[in-house]
Image (cartoon, rainbow, N blue to C red):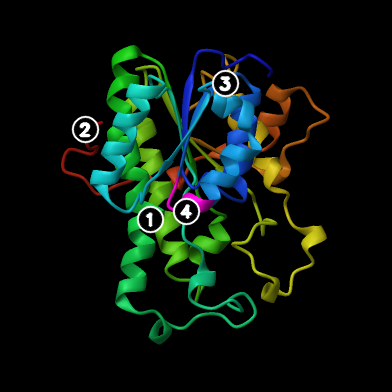
Amino acid sequence: MTGELEGRVAVVTGAAGGIGREFVSGLLGAGAKVAALDIDGGRLGELAAAHQADAAAGRLVTLPADIARWAECEAAVGRVRERLGGPDILVNNGAVGMGVIRADHMTKLVAIDEIEPEVWDRFVAVNFSGAWYMTRASVGGMLDRGWGRIVNVTTSFFTMLRGRFHPYGPAKSGLEAMSAGHAAEFAGRGVTVNVVVPGGPTDTPMVPPESGIDRALMVRPAAMVPPVLWLCSAEGAGWTGHRYVAGNWDAALDPAAAAEGCRAPIAWPDLAQSPVWPGGKPPE
């Protein structure tokens, strides 16, 4: 993939740690210019230091931003356009994890009375609305140019529907549904929308030591990169409206075969085929 994305501009949210750092490294390695967004300015500084040559060459720009706020998303994308151009690629990775409620949330699941309303609001704002804000701010230029790649990081269906795993599960299920709707809205206009998920617990700070899970058995954060790079490549251009389970990506295969092996329809399309609708079918 070296040089495959030469001339493209990518934006990654939640870029300063865990999976986000891997996305930044992978996209830079593929030749893209990258704007790394995160609420944590200190960790963004560490990211820039780790990619000092790219930052010095103007290929990496770090931008502190709270994606829970529309004005900050709009301003950040404006700065990306001024400094790098584009954006052509948007990876909506930024999220708040259940650890902000309790570190032992995976062994002692969270009850509704433990979730303060402001915590619920923050989860929805970051994990769901933040991706919409970033898409809204970025997609106009993609549609005008007839080329764009939007990748949203959701979670397993098990986690979405798991009892006592709120607000994370419901917010990610909303992002999954939104991804399906945007894939349909932008279809045929050169802009693809897909979902990439780890497939299980991932070795990032979002899964704290108190989880009780052997970290050696977790999905590696770097596993998320190959599906995203493939979706951004010329070979992946024809695919939209799908979800890719990174933990099932087989690096021993040709990338197209690896993609096929971990691909499924986005969201829940089988459940949407028989609406009770006047005249039989709603307009598309």
| Stretch of the chain drawn in magenta | 38-42
**Viewer-side label of 2, 1:** 1
Q: Quadrant of residue 133?
A: top left
Q: Secondary structure at mark 2?
A: loop
User: Is residue 141 or residue 146 the one in the foreground?
Assistant: 141
Give the residue pinned by disc 4. 40
Residue at image position (77%, 35%) is 250
Where residue 176 appears, as percent x and y from the top left, is 43, 48
| Disc 1: CA contacts within 10 A as few (<14), some (14-19) or many (>=20) | many
Residue extending farthest to the left is 278
Residue at image position (49%, 45%) is 93
Q: Secondary structure at mark 3?
A: loop
Question: Badges 4 and 1: C-beta atoms under 8 Å apart?
Answer: no
Give the residue pinned by disc 2. 283
**Viewer-side label of 4, 1:** 4
User: Which comes sooner in the sequence, label 4 or label 1?
Assistant: 4
User: Which comes sooner in the sequence, label 2 or label 4?
Assistant: 4
Give the residue pinned by disc 1. 126
Type of amino acid under label 3: Gly
**Viewer-side label of 4, 3:** 4
User: Which comes sooner in the sequence, label 2 or label 1?
Assistant: 1
Type of amino acid under label 1: Val
